[in-house]
Amino acid sequence: MEAPPLSGAELPRLRTAVPGPRSRALASRLRSVESRNITHITAEGPIFWSEARDAVVRDADGNDYIDLTAGFGVSMAGHANAAVADAIAAQARRLPHALGDVHPAEAKVRLLEVLARLAPGSLGVSILASSGAEAVEAALKTAMLKTGRPGILAFDGAYHGLTYGALAATWRPDFRGPFQPQLFPGVRFAPWPADGPGAVDEERRAIQSIERILAEAERSDWPIGAILAEPILGRGGLIVPTTGFLPALRQLCDGASRLLLLDEVYTGFGRTGRWFACEHWDVVPDVLIVGKALGGGVPLSAAIGTPDAMAAWPASTGEAIHTSTFLGNPIACAAALAHLEQIQQRGLVERAARIGAHIQDRVALWAARMPAVAGVRGLGLLQAITFHDPGEQRSFALAVADEALRRGVLALAEGSALDVLALTPPAVITDGQLDHALDVIETVIGAVSP
């Protein structure tokens, strides 16, 4: 019997084992036609999505799950948001593609105007792209044009994407290793000071290390013209920095010989309880990099710079030195306009802050009485449950995620060692769905603990 269409208000309902027979069959087919490096196929998964609505995902076998991932943080206003879907359909019927850097669509102009209004400070001149990594590279190019200094300072734990320019500034050795000979050699990595016990000393040591790196780079072939940072480490484990760290980075960048580039691909558009995470520290970068939630489910990203930084780009003479076929794609721009309007009209930035506080309160209770749980960290709907070492070789967080999936809750293990459980649901998740999902995770932690 076919399952009824999703309303978005469902609690988990499992009609088969997880993964079910159709997901297993699709995994077998996928294995023969996709590079084996892409999708991780095991006995535990994957499940194959067939439908989604708000914070509910249905797989190919008709199983319904509460989604605590928002599709890697994309669906801030919910999966298949009706307003976004209507905007996509209307734009697709009228104009699905244009000549983005030659004869653009009107939707591109309207989106850039909205981004200029939403971005903090004087940020307001943008370069559009499709993926977060592309926007990172547009920001790095901006720094090179503005400063004439090719070196880049990035941070331990950083993740900025896997295209070559972004990969050079991505910390993880397992991502970098196979391609190291082709990566730009002018990137240096500095410590990332985490908020928490010992934060003052950790911040002081990190800033001293940065100052030393900057001084050393001045005597090299790669003087540093860009400091590239995530306001909160994302794939590095959802690590919030010490209170004074981002302001210190701002002081080290004068906007002329050195630019501050903040990668808010993951944290932007309300996820942390502010429109942009940098606003928690009253820091405005020279270039703000956004993506994920921008497109409401359609690939879209942007590098939003100050007028001064972006003036380093030469005026187009008919051949742009940085562009792409799908720059300012009309469908993507229409989806973004609708998604940003939904976030504003429904008060989802404020709701993200409230839900995040509720998650932290719940997990704090677990830490007080569950030996496996160390605590929780994050801002808004970017929360990480941390664990004490359970004494197992396999990641405890990954084991919790696998078992939660079998019980109808989608969550991801994060961190370079997959050592935290990330909770990043859509802001439209209902209170009942959230508490049910947290109940499941609480039960699962107890079940998989040694």
Image (cartoon, rainbow, N blue to C red):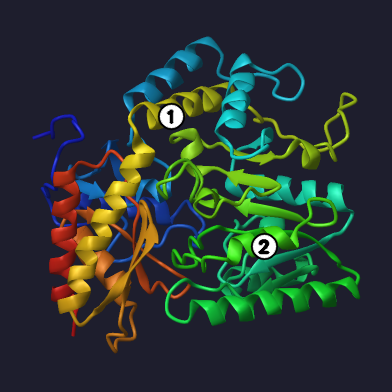
Residues 20 and 336: in front is: 336
Q: How many marks?
A: 2
- Return the residue at label 1: 339
- Residue 169 x, y percent position in the rendering: 67, 63
Quadrant where the N terminus is found in the figure: top left
Q: Quick one: SS at disc 2?
A: helix
Alpha-carbon distance for marks 2 and 1? Answer: 31 Å
Look at label 1 and name its amino acid.
His
- Residue 313 x, y percent position in the rendering: 84, 38
Quadrant where the C terminus is found in the figure: bottom left
Query: Residue at left 74%, top 63%?
Result: 252
- Of circles 2 and 1, the one toward us is 2
Task: Name the residue at the left extreme.
Answer: 1
Residues 145 and 38: in front is: 145
Q: Is residue 329 visible?
A: no
- Residue 26 x, y percent position in the rendering: 32, 49
**Among the 4 quarters of the image, the one containing residue 174:** bottom right
- Residue 327 x, y percent position in the rendering: 66, 30
Query: Residue at left 77%, top 20%?
Result: 102
Q: Is residue 437 left or right of residue 228?
A: left
Residues 192 and 399: in front is: 192
Is 220 situated above or below 137? below
Q: Quick one: SS at disc 1?
A: helix
**Contact? badges 2 and 1 (CB < 8 Å):** no
Query: Residue at left 18%, top 42%?
Result: 62
- Return the residue at label 2: 249
The label shown at residue 381 is: none
Look at label 2 and name its amino acid.
Leu
Q: Is residue 402 visible?
A: yes
